[in-house]
Amino acid sequence: MAAVAAAVGSAGPARLTLADVARAAGVSTGALVQRYGSKRGLLLGFVRWELSRDSSVRPMRAAFESAPDPVEGLIRAVVRSVGHEAEPAEFANNLAFLHLELADEEFRALLGEHIRGVRAELHGYLEAAVASGHLAGTADLGALAAAADSIRNGTQLAWAMDRSGPLAEALRRDLRTLLDPYRVIKEEQ
């Protein structure tokens, strides 16, 4: 599956071939055909595999748990969830994969499952922030979780077009703009 991810990033879903993935994975093309049937089957298998291993949520949790407070934890979790700063061609190829996911009902259903999982994770971080007194209890946590996820996606797209400064800085800036009005400033004892 790492070979699929690398091939999508370097070739994009349209130019990707089973032979490319087989070569990168060190298996025969026939083995991929036998297991997945087609390129679409392989890509669906890849998305299911990504979802089954919680590949985006697990690193988010680690970043959240290592933060000094839950609000900063949410910010670190979102930054961690986007991964590395992709080169323009790799970002474009991954965006083309998203286009495939949006255009195909089966892919779209899996993408919806992913989004619901990420938003539930963000909602949990916001609940922890309220419970610890770092975030105002009057905030609509469902709406904040959805907005934080929208920032996660939208900031990446805007950054890919502009590329002024590091992506992590852009995400931190935009998330702080969203969350700062709800932050509770604790007085030092």
Image: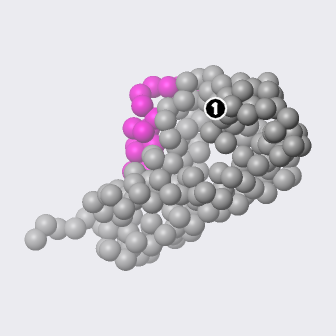
Circle 1: element type = helix
Q: Residue at x 42, y 39 (%)?
A: 168
When the figure is inspected, residue 144 is found, relative to residue 22, above or below; the finding is below
Task: Please check the rendered image and state whether residue 163 is part of the magenta-colored stretch, yes or no.
Answer: yes
Q: Quadrant of residue 119?
A: bottom right
Q: Residue at x 59, y 23 (%)?
A: 88
In the image: residue 171, left or right of residue 154: left
Q: Quadrant of the N terminus?
A: top right
Q: Quadrant of residue 12?
A: top right
Total labels: the figure holds 1
Magenta residues (range): 161-177
Q: Residue at x 79, y 42 (%)?
A: 42
- Mark yes or no: residue 35 visible: yes
In the image: residue 128, left or right of residue 117: left
In the image: residue 75, left or right of residue 18: left
What x and y, as percent, mark residue 31? 81, 39
What x and y, as percent, mark residue 92? 66, 28
Mark 1 residue type: Ala
**Residue tagged 1:** 6
In the image: residue 188, left or right of residue 150: left
| Frontmost residue, 53 versus 97 | 53
Magenta segment main secondary structure: helix
Q: Quadrant of the C terminus?
A: bottom left
| Frontmost residue, 55 versus 25 | 25
When the figure is inspected, residue 24 is found, relative to residue 101, above or below; the finding is above
What x and y, as percent, mark residue 23? 72, 27
Q: Residue at x 45, y 46 (%)?
A: 79
| Frontmost residue, 50 versus 2 | 2
Task: Please check the rendered image and state whether residue 141 is part of the magenta-colored stretch, yes or no.
Answer: no
Q: Residue furthest left?
A: 189
What x and y, as percent, mark residue 50? 65, 51
